[in-house]
Amino acid sequence: MNSPEALLPLHPKDFQILFALVDEPCHGYGIVREIERASRGRVRIDPANLYRSIKRMIGTGLVEEADAPEPAGPEDERRRYYRITDFGMAVVRLEAKRLDDLAAAARSRRLIPDERRR
């Protein structure tokens, strides 16, 4: 397995998927909804790209299939759930830190406002 640093920088879509899985396992449609919610509607991933990305991320050890919670209805029995792995968590943490450093550099050049100085 690669070191987490070897996968940086992450593709923005991969970061969004991992970020959506940080708190709990989720099915594909739930991942799409969480990405839209977390990005305030600015990022949308179509299902075909989502599942292609998840398949690749399973192959690299970032994500794995998870057991489904108790089904709420018949549609839940067919849904596949995914969770972030420990390796995936290490990668998403490093990427979040990298993005935070980049945002700090942008603030220092006044490209984005520093909300802490208001």
Image (tube, rainbow, N blue to C red):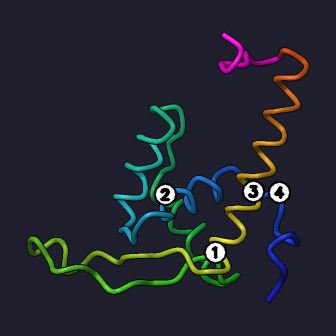
Q: Residue furthest top?
A: 118
Asked if labels 4 and 2 touch by Cβ distance under 8 angstroms, the answer is no
Please check the rendered image and state whether residue 115 is part of the magenta-colored stretch, yes or no.
yes
| Residue that label 2 marks | 20
Where does the image place residue 105, in percent across and percent down from the top left?
88, 31
Check disc 1 and report the residue beneath it. 57
- Residue 25 in which image quadrant: bottom left
Distance of label 4 from label 3 (alpha carbons): 7 Å
- Of the two numbered discs 1 and 3 on the same chain, state the one appearing first in sequence: 1
Which of discs 4 and 3 lies nearer the camera? The answer is: 3
Residue behind mark 4: 9
Amino acid type, label 1: Met
Indicate which label's residue lies in the foreground, 4 or 1: 4
Q: In the depicted view, which residue is nearer to us: 111 or 39?
A: 111
Residues at circles 4 and 1 in contact by the CB criterion of under 8 Å:
no
Q: Residue at x 44, y 63 (%)?
A: 23
Q: Nearer the viewer, mark 1 or mark 3?
A: 3
Q: Which residue type does callout 3 highlight? A: Glu
Q: Residue at x 73, y 19 (%)?
A: 114
Left or right relative to 11: residue 86: left
Range shown magenta: 111-118
Residue 7 placement: quadrant:
bottom right
Please tell me which of labels 4 and 1 falls first in the chain.
Answer: 4
Q: Amino acid at mark 4?
A: Pro
Which residue is labeled 3 in the image? 95
Question: Residue at the location (55% across, 57% down)?
Answer: 19
Of tags 2 and 1, which is closer to the observer? Answer: 2
Magenta region, main secondary structure: loop
Question: Is the C-beta separation of discs 4 and 3 under 8 Å?
Answer: yes
Give the camera-side residue of 116 and 22: 116
Residue 69 pos. (x, y %): 23, 79
Q: CA distance from mark 4 to mark 1?
A: 14 Å
